[in-house]
Image (spheres, helix red, strand yellow):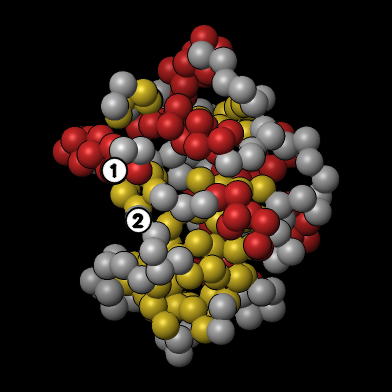
Amino acid sequence: MPKALVPVAGQPLLAHTLSTLTRQGATESVVNVHHFGEQIIDHLATHPYPIPVHISDERSALLNTGGGLRKALPLFGQEDSTPVLIHNVDILSNADLRAFYERNRQFPATLLVSPRPSTRQLIIREGRLIGWTNLTTGEVKGSLDGEQYAFSGIHLFSPALGAATMSEWPEAFSIMDYYLSICHDVEIHAEVCHDLRLLDVGKADSITQAEQFLSSLNP
């Protein structure tokens, strides 16, 4: 099955994510599908959610995080000046998404980051992205002259920024490579959340841990 439909505490990860977004003020959503995408489409057709859920279909070609976002943007009914919130489906957290959105909607893009262990670290200086490093391989992109923080998989993005800067990118590309390529000319803002609790439900053996995490968020 697709990761989005892996059950945690009786509900698929997708349901947890959409429920969280709805509670925190989302008015519509777009779900991109690729691996076993028809299962997600069938689930959404038979499990109505309180807000409209549009499908961005990548079953013919996986577009990566950047290409997938570019394809999904026209499906939102918002104006170009209204930012969208991107949330990885396999992330559970205690983030106040509504407050994060309202605090940062004036920026072209904002990454939610925190000081936690990760092999891949973003380099942040004076509240903006300037670089990236892989601590395992030693690979560096951009500058290291800043503080290291881990990316949460949650970020805001202005469609106007995409319209102005994404057209020359290939069909499939990484959103982080895109951010790093423009961060010296465009402010890619970073909000540091020191009390962020986050769990990446990326593997089957993390399901029990995810259920315990959810219980701790909703005692």
> Please, is residue 190 above or below residue 59 in the view?
below
Q: Amino acid at mark 1?
A: Ser
> Residue, x 62% and y 34% (percent of image)?
29
- The residue tagged 1 is 216
Residue 197 - label: 2
Q: Does the image show residue 36?
A: yes
Location of the N terminus by quadrant is: top left
> Residue, x 57% and y 21% (percent of image)?
49
Of residues 218 and 197, the one nearer the viewer is 218
Side of 198 relative to 192 (left or right): left
The percent position of residue 6, horizontal first and vertical second, equals: 32, 27
**Comparing labels 1 and 2, the label whose residue is closer to the camera:** 1
> Residue, x 56% and y 35% (percent of image)?
23
Determine the image quadrant of residue 51: top right
Q: Secondary structure at mark 1?
A: helix
Side of 99 relative to 81 (left or right): left
